Amino acid sequence: MSVFIDTNVLVRSIEPSSPMHEPAVRAIASVIKSGEAVVLTPQVVAEFRNVVTRPLDKNGLGLSPEEARDEIVRMEGFFSLLGETEEVYSEWKRLVMTYRVIGVQVHDARLVAAMKVNGSERLLTFDAQDFLRYNDIIQIIHPQFVGGI
């Protein structure tokens, strides 16, 4: 079994001023301590870099490219990276049609596709509402309720 970590949890885990910082850190530590594989995709890493290097006045963290690189290297030491394969693409196409996904939500469908293809059924995210349509195929875990892991 593995637990997929969403971008928002990673971002909050390095943002001490966020009220979501402690739940994010606690949840990630709990999953790692459980011995389960903790996974993410290249898409999540790209989204993470986008947010952390974006200026503060644009809802980012304002990290330098070097600081972002260092955070990503640190993450790579803790988490496994799922591949982006043709199978993931096929599953993504199926999901967006099955669940009638449009707009920005197509990115979340891609994460769910990678999870399904790679056998990861649990998602740790602060944005549970964005994934509710998939609650028949994945388990959504909010970091505040990490005791359920």
Image (cartoon, rainbow, N blue to C red):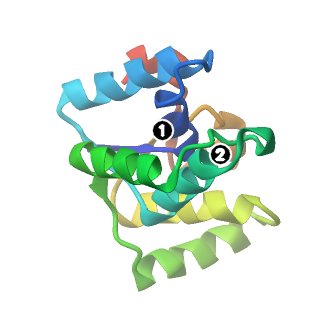
Which amino acid type is shown beneath numbered disc 2?
A: Phe
| Residue 147 placement (x, y as % from top left) | 40, 14
**Does label 1 or label 2 sit earlier along the sequence?**
1
Between label 1 and label 2, give the one nearer the viewer: 1
- SS for callout 2: helix
In front: 33, or 92?
33
Residue located farthest toward the bottom when viewing the structure as drawn: 86
Q: Are marks 1 and 2 in contact (CB under 8 Å)?
A: no
Residue 112 in sight = no
The circle on residue 59 is none
Residue drawn at 75 percent across, 40 percent down? 59
Residue matched to label 2: 131
How far apart are the alpha carbons under marks 1 and 2?
Answer: 17 Å
The quarter of the image holding the C terminus is top left
> In the image, is 13 to the left or to the right of 39?
right
Task: Out of 70 and 44, give the one closest to the viewer.
Answer: 70
Question: Which residue is at 73% across, 58% downward?
Answer: 105
The residue beneath circle 1 is: 10
Q: Residues within 10 Å of mark 1 (few under 14, many from 20)?
A: many
Q: Amino acid at mark 1?
A: Leu
Image x and y of residue 144, in percent: 53, 16
Tell me, yes or no, if residue 17 can be seen here.
yes
Residue at image position (62%, 78%) is 93
